[in-house]
């Protein structure tokens, strides 16, 4: 077996060495053969090492490729999962935008979505307020009042950033210099018309809030931490402001007439242009013009009856311009059913109303609203644009682009909400102003000049069923006085007036106040009146005023939600005599007479009534409450004084009785002492007589 092994392993090489030794015939054949075999072994070993190294390298390369493939697969799966998550999140966000019916609903959901999408530490939004528009005695700097934030950052809603502190954020609101655009021309000198480009929202980005020139201009509400800061400006025109709605209602007739004239002029210009085109084409239009003129006269007479002449003329002119192409369609329209005709007319009416509203909204003064959408990564590390762990977190370019897209969606949604609110509030404001005019017209015929609650003449229009004549008011107050007396309650003039006013509000004004909370984005008149009402009813400050102590309608209107059942229940059950200034804590004294009186002391009922009759009634209700409280305080003082007098009289009588008894006791004592002395004198006299007798 050993021979076979040697023959198999050494034989071939030894045979080759022997053959070379014979061929070359070296001097020392043994040395030649040994050297040859050693060199051959070394060469083979080197080749084998090279082959092993190559194979090892190939294995390592294969392992790297497999590892990379596995990593790419994991990354692809993660990307797919992330994309699915992003798609689901965006779907949810779109649903939120679609279903939100108010700014208060959409902002928190949007901020939560945005924070999760880009991994921000905080997301919050503020509204720009002009220092000159806050009603201060001296105009202060503009400020940014935060109105929404992610749940963990709601503490910022109590803050307000002044322009002189938030220099970085207020760069968003600096005046912009519009670049001068020179007209572009082609090679032939013709102007080049380019498609409009949607510009990005104005923004400011601070990569590191602790370093750099912008970092020194940042304002920190809390302890500074590393991270980045990104803010964008969102702007839109406010269509539901008090002055805007009033202007809309006042100028509606004027603007609709202007639109009618412009539509007619446009239709006439289109008709003349079409006639000119046809003349140039050599068509005979004289006969057609004659026939169309006769038809127009007949149709105009019909149109004048329903007030839609302008709209129908415009439609006819458009139809005439394409009469040849639409001849078959006109024949089919003549055969439409009654339901089809009603459906068509309803669509035309809705389209006409939308066009009228759009025309009105473009021709009234709408103030600009500016928001600052802010995100930061303060305190976050890792996941930065460089991907280096431990580096302060900053937004990548792709993330900032995503934030831009989301902010534009939010801006569009805010515009849609503004338009939807305008559609509703325009009609509500028309009803309110119509009611206001009817009330003032009814009151101008007479009535109570002191409180305006009675109408001298017959109520007209919408004032019917709301206002009461002086006779009706007197009867109601007599009835209320009798009921209070029968119930054993106070029926002073002040108490009767208060009960009458409360019943009037609950009976006649409840629908109007519910409408305010449901649809109105503002209230016509001083909000201090509602502030006083809510304070008297025991609502907390947080439900009425903002962090800076100013009355805020967006908070107050929520108290009327659900048809205001809680509010009207509190109003119905309120007892102005139940509490006194001395019986409440120091923190709650804003609900008491001195604080409430200060809120309304400068308000004039007549001036308030000119703008909002219902608000003037609430002002009178507050005054009635204060009058009852004052009366109760006087009665309490008088009762306490009478009680003090009664107690003093009782004390005096008691003291006199005690003195009388004391005198009687002393007299008795003296009498008792006198009888004893007389008995002793008699005994002494008898003893003396006996002694004399013995002597």
Image (cartoon, grey):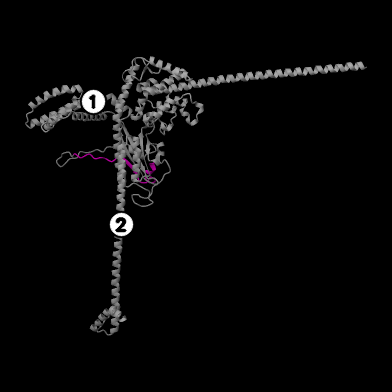
Between 173 and 526, the one nearer to me in the picture: 526
Considering only order in the chain, which callout, 1 or 2, is on the residue closer to the N terminus? 2
> Looking at the rendering, in which quadrant would you find the N terminus?
bottom left
Q: Are marks 2 and 1 in contact (CB under 8 Å)?
A: no
Q: Which of the numbered marks, if any, corresponds to residue 256?
A: 1
* Residue 270 visible in image: no
Above or below residue 535? Residue 190 is: below
Magenta-colored stretch includes residue 571: no
Horizontally, residue 657 falls left or right of residue 178, namely right
Magenta-colored stretch includes residue 201: yes
Report which residue position mark 2 lands on: 70
- Stretch in magenta: 193-218
Horizontally, residue 233 falls left or right of residue 593, namely left
Q: Main secondary structure of the magenta part?
A: loop
* Residue 4 visible in image: yes
Disc 1 residue crowd, few under 14, some 14–19, many 20+, Cα 10 Å:
some
Residue 488 location (% of width, % of height): 49, 20
Residue 197 location (% of width, % of height): 24, 40
Regarding mark 1 in the picture, which secondary structure is present there? Answer: helix
Above or below residue 421? Residue 68 is: below
Between 216 and 554, the one nearer to me in the picture: 554
């Amino acid at each position: 077996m050993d021979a076979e092994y040697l023959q198999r392993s050494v034989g071939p090489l030894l045979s080759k060495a022997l053959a070379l030794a014979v061929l070359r015939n070296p001097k020392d054949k043994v040395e030649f053969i040994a050297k040859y075999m050693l060199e051959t072994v070394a060469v083979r070993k080197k080749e084998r090492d090279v082959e092993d190294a190559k194979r090892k390298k190939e294995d390592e390369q294969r392992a790297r490729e497999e590892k990379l493939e596995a990593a790419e697969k994991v990354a692809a799966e993660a990307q797919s999962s992330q994309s699915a998550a992003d798609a689901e999140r965006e779907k949810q966000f779109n649903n939120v935008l679609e279903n939100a019916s108010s700014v208060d609903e959409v902002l928190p959901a949007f901020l939560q979505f945005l924070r999760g999408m880009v991994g921000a530490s905080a997301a919050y939004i503020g509204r720009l307020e002009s220092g000159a528009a806050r009603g201060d005695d001296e105009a202060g700097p503009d400020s940014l009042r935060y109105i929404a934030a992610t749940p963990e950052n709601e503490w910022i809603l109590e803050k307000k950033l002044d322009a002189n502190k938030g220099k970085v954020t207020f760069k968003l609101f600096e005046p912009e210099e519009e670049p001068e655009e020179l007209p572009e021309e082609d090679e032939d000198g013709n102007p080049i018309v380019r498609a409009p480009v949607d510009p990005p929202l104005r923004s400011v980005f601070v990569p590191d809030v602790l370093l750099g020139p912008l970092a020194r201009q940042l304002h920190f509400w809390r302890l500074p931490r590393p991270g980045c800061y990104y803010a964008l400006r969102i702007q839109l025109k406010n269509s539901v402001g008090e002055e805007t709605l009033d202007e809309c209602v006042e100028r509606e007739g004027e603007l609709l007439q202007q639109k009618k004239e412009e539509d007619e002029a446009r239709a006439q210009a289109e008709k003349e242009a079409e006639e000119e085109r046809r003349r140039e084409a050599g068509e005979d239009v004289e006969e057609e013009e004659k026939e169309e003129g006769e038809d127009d006269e007949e149709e105009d007479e019909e149109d004048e009856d329903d007030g839609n002449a302008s709209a129908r003329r415009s439609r006819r002119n458009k139809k005439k311009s394409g009469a040849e192409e639409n001849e078959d369609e006109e024949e089919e329209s003549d055969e439409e059913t009654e339901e089809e005709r009603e459906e068509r007319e309803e669509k035309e009416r809705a389209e006409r109303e939308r066009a009228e509203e759009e025309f009105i909204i473009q021709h009234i003064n709408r103030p600009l609203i500016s928001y600052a959408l802010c995100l930061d990564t303060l305190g976050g590390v890792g996941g930065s644009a460089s991907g280096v762990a431990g580096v302060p977190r900053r937004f990548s370019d792709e993330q900032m682009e995503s934030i831009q897209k989301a902010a534009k969606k939010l801006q569009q949604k805010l515009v849609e909400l503004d338009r939807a609110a305008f559609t509703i509030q325009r009609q509500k404001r028309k009803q309110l102003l119509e009611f206001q005019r009817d009330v003032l017209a009814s009151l101008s015929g007479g009535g109570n000049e002191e409180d305006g609650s009675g109408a001298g003449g017959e109520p007209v229009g919408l004032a019917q069923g709301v206002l009461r004549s002086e006779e009706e008011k007197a009867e109601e107050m007599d009835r209320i006085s009798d009921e209070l007396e029968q119930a054993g309650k106070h029926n002073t003039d002040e108490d009767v007036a208060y009960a009458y006013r409360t019943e009037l509000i609950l009976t006649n004004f409840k629908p109007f106040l519910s409408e305010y909370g449901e649809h109105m984005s503002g209230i016509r008149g001083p909000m201090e009146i509602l502030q006083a009402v809510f304070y008297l009813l025991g609502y907390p400050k947080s439900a009425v005023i903002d962090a800076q102590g100013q009355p805020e309608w967006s908070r107050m209107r929520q108290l009327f939600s659900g048809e205001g059942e809680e509010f009207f229940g509190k109003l119905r059950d309120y007892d102005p005599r139940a509490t006194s200034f001395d019986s409440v804590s120091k923190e709650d004294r804003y609900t008491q007479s001195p604080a409430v009186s200060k809120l309304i002391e400068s308000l004039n009922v007549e001036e308030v009534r000119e703008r909002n009759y219902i608000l003037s009634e609430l002002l009178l209700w507050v005054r009635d409450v204060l009058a009852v409280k004052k009366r109760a305080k006087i009665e309490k003082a008088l009762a306490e004084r009478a009680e003090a007098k009664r107690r003093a009289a009782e004390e005096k009588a008691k003291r006199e009785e005690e003195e009388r008894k004391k005198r009687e006791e002393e007299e008795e004592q003296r009498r008792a002492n006198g009888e004893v002395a007389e008995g002793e004198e008699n005994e002494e006299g008898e003893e003396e007589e006996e002694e004399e007798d013995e002597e």
